[in-house]
Amino acid sequence: MKTINRRSFLKAGAAMTAGSVVLPEFFIGKAGAAANSKLNIAMIGCGNIASMALDGCNSENIVALCDVDSNMLFKYAKKYPQIKQAKTFTDFHVMLHKMGNEIDAVCVSTPDHTHFAATMASMEHGKHVFTQKPLTHNIWQARTLRKAMHKYKVITNMGNQGHTYGGIRRLREWYEADVFGQISEAHSWIDGPTWNGGYFPRKMSFPLSVDPVPAGLDYDLWLGPNAKTPYHKNYHPKTWRGFNQFGTGTLGDWFCHVADAPVWLLDLYEPVSIEAEETTGGNEFIAHDSIRIRYDFVNRGTKIPCTFYWHNGPKNTPKSIPDLKEKWGLTRDLPQYGTLYKGEKGVAYTNHRSDEARFFNNDQMRELNKLKLPEKYPRVEGGPVKEFVRAVKGEGPKPGSNFDYAAPMTEVMLLGVIAARHGGKIEWDAKNMKITNRPELNADLNEPVRKGWEYGKDLWS
């Protein structure tokens, strides 16, 4: 019998999970070996949100840490002392070149504008990849990552926790049991950005000041594919997401959480039009204070046309849709955040993590509970990183937010970003990846990159 080393087995287990190959006979019955093997995982981005990846990988080997800011490398060493044994790098290109044979999977926890390059480079080296949300900074990147997943036959997952929760699965089970009837309209909303710290910096005057680069930060690497830009103190750490050059504002921060359920439930992947009905604040540099985006979808299989609205703004966000309560005949005030679905048989609700699925009407909810509908979709334990780890080891199914799902959902979000930044309505040809009524905006679909940061063009030839 042929000898199987650890890396060969892990690769085969991932292929079995992905359903992409037929395994040779000698792999049959070897699942226990995968269960007793630990993955060797590398971290690209080690501060702040990286704690989510480290939590999910706490049963595995962390063999490499890479961060452009040396101050972040061991930020979580007290909580995860095993990472002190990991090799450290500033440049992920160098890490992948030097340690490629020692790494099974990579977790990418960098700012949005470097998600694509770090993820593509990892896949080109044959590594399975978990990437934080939002998946990419532009639409071409999202489609390219999806192509790359299939070319390199790797396991992927995006970090939107709610897609692993029971609520989103419960909602889909009810919908497919015709509890709500057809759904023709949905609204998702969340507060923010709040320009007083946290993920978003305090309001600034423009042009921005030029500040000294902090000790330990390789700012050129931090910029990654972006054009050379003078450093400003609010770019790093953590508060980059409010800047258009690096992040995608509250829409990019929260769409994949709040709107995960309506997108998955209603197949909201290819809108025919997207309109910024209202925007306040914001400029060419910084995200808006509040936005209302309307997406229109035609028939999708047996699903009727649907209009989806995204709202974000101050903490009184429900007041941005003041007529909804009266128009839909709701007897209670709208929650602070979440999604409402207008069904033929009633109004449904999920929270800001696409969880807590329920009828908005309490009496209807009590009647629904009496039905005791069976669980059709398996529940996921431990969140998206553990889901990813199990899939790579061949111990579980393909992750729910793999790039076949995460890329199209990210694309819908990014169309909203384009509409908000330019105002008005855009008409979208999803098949040909084109804005048809305002062709000048197609430049936003694929941003220019600096020399040395080009990835994925070969996938389109």
Image (spheres, grey):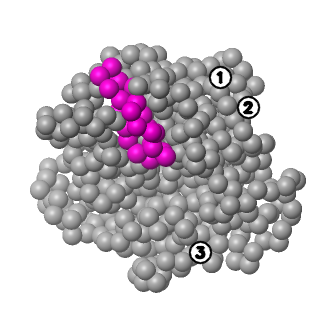
Kindly identify which residue carries mark 3: 72
Q: Amino acid at mark 2?
A: His
Q: Which mark is residue 422?
A: 2
Question: Left or right of 47: which side holds 230?
Answer: right
Indicate the amino acid at tag 1: Ile
Q: Is residue 340 magenta?
A: yes
- Residue at image point 39% right, 68% down: 55
Q: Which residues are magenta?
A: 330-352
On the image, numbered disc 1 is attached to which residue? Answer: 426
Disc 2 from disc 3: Cα separation: 36 Å
Q: Residue at x 32, y 26 (%)?
A: 346
Compared with residue 330, is residue 138 higher up or lower down, i.e. above or below? below
Does residue 393 appear in this view? yes
- Secondary structure beneath disc 3? helix
- Kindly identify the amino acid type of the residue bearing the numbered disc 3: Met
Residue 20 placement (x, y as % from top left): 30, 41
Where residue 418 sits: x, y (%)? 66, 34
Query: Quadrant location of residue 231?
Result: bottom right
